[in-house]
Amino acid sequence: MKSVRRAVAASAAALLALTMTACGEDGGEEPLSDDALVIYSGRNENLVGPLLEKLEDETGIDVQVRYAGSSELAAQLLEEGEGTKADLFFSQDAGALGALAKADRLETLPEATLAEVQEGFADPNGHWVATSARARVIAYDPAQAPEVTEMTTVDAVLDPKYKGKIGFAPTNASFQSFVTALRVTKGEDGAKEWLEEFAANEPKAYDNNILVLDAVDSGQIALGLINHYYWYERVAEKGADAVKAKIHFLDSDDPGALVNVAGVGILAGSPQKEAAVKAVDFLLSEEGQRYFADETAEYPVVEGITSTKHDLVPLAELERSSVDLNSLDSLEQTLALLDEVGLT
């Protein structure tokens, strides 16, 4: 198998570079080729590297990938402007794609490509398309908080009875995206009030979602705010009977029911647009979508494709937040607000 060649992401000094720790890792730098399809990937190499190798093998396209955090790469792309070597941006979240779309740095995708995904999983203006989706859920210990199954809004976690019993990962991008959705939905004052009440409940901060789930599963806390796939991966690894924690999907149009996406956009003026479209179509193919469903326990965004490893609640059945995913690009303001209320 011809291996996908990698180049290291340079640090971005622009605004968005301050908003997220890079997901990539340092390695030997390789000059980017004008003849290859150059992908800037905010998705971790361990997660998507094998899939991008398959892309190279299946399409015959020579691929180079630069890995780093999504917002770091978005900042770099904004700084590079029309002089960028990148052809395709593969983002971990919609906010970074929204930032590039607002700056007119993304091409309009073909209608046939946009039509491949379920409704609501492509930019209304056609500048990017989702490749997979992930849902915010409440992980809970049934012995301590069986009532979680009746929750319809994330406001319920503000109940004083959960004081000191809530887990969250403040530096995790998924929590920050949730807070951004909170700001978009409730307004700046409403979001600040919510976060102040949340802070008053003395939530326990963890370095990542896995540790939040660990704490719920062991009974150290009653509930935690995580993404759905951490629980599904745990069940696949240990078996359902060995996992005490459960998860609950909120059944209302609520920021706690946010379904965020990973997605792709083609850089404006790319000389490799034809190859980039083929790459996008590969990620939306049955092979690409099943990879996300099986290997990362994320939701396929193409109808009719399911996981062979995880018993995922169908994406179409989720009552997800109606927030415009493009509006999740204001991460800097979110971080400032979290710092102001003492949740960083």
Image (cartoon, helix red, strand yellow):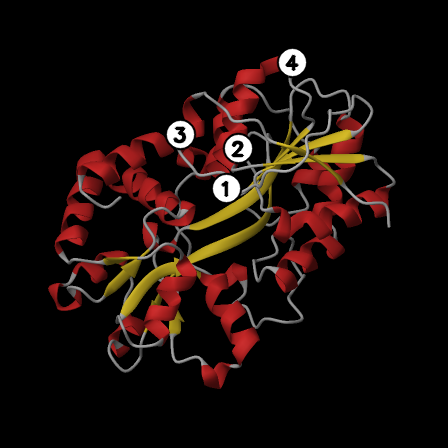
How many numbered marks are there? Answer: 4
x 68%, y 58%: residue: 291
- Gap in Å between the C-alphas at discs 2 and 3? 16 Å
Amino acid on which disc 1 is placed: Asp
> Pointer 1 and pointer 2: residues touching (CB < 8 Å)?
yes
Location of residue 253 in the rendering, given as x and y in whole percent from the top left corner: 35, 53
Around disc 3, counting alpha carbons within 10 Å, would you say few (fewer than 14), some (14 to 19), or many (20 or more)?
some
x 34%, y 30%: residue: 332
Amino acid on which disc 3 is placed: Leu
Q: In this figure, which residue is indicated by the disc labeled 2?
A: 97
Q: In this figure, which residue is indicated by the disc labeled 3?
A: 18
Location of residue 116 in the rendering, given as x and y in whole percent from the top left corner: 68, 46
> Pointer 2 and pointer 3: residues touching (CB < 8 Å)?
no
**Towards the viewer: 176 or 312:** 176
- Give the number of the disc on residue 93: 1
- Gap in Å between the C-alphas at discs 4 and 2? 18 Å
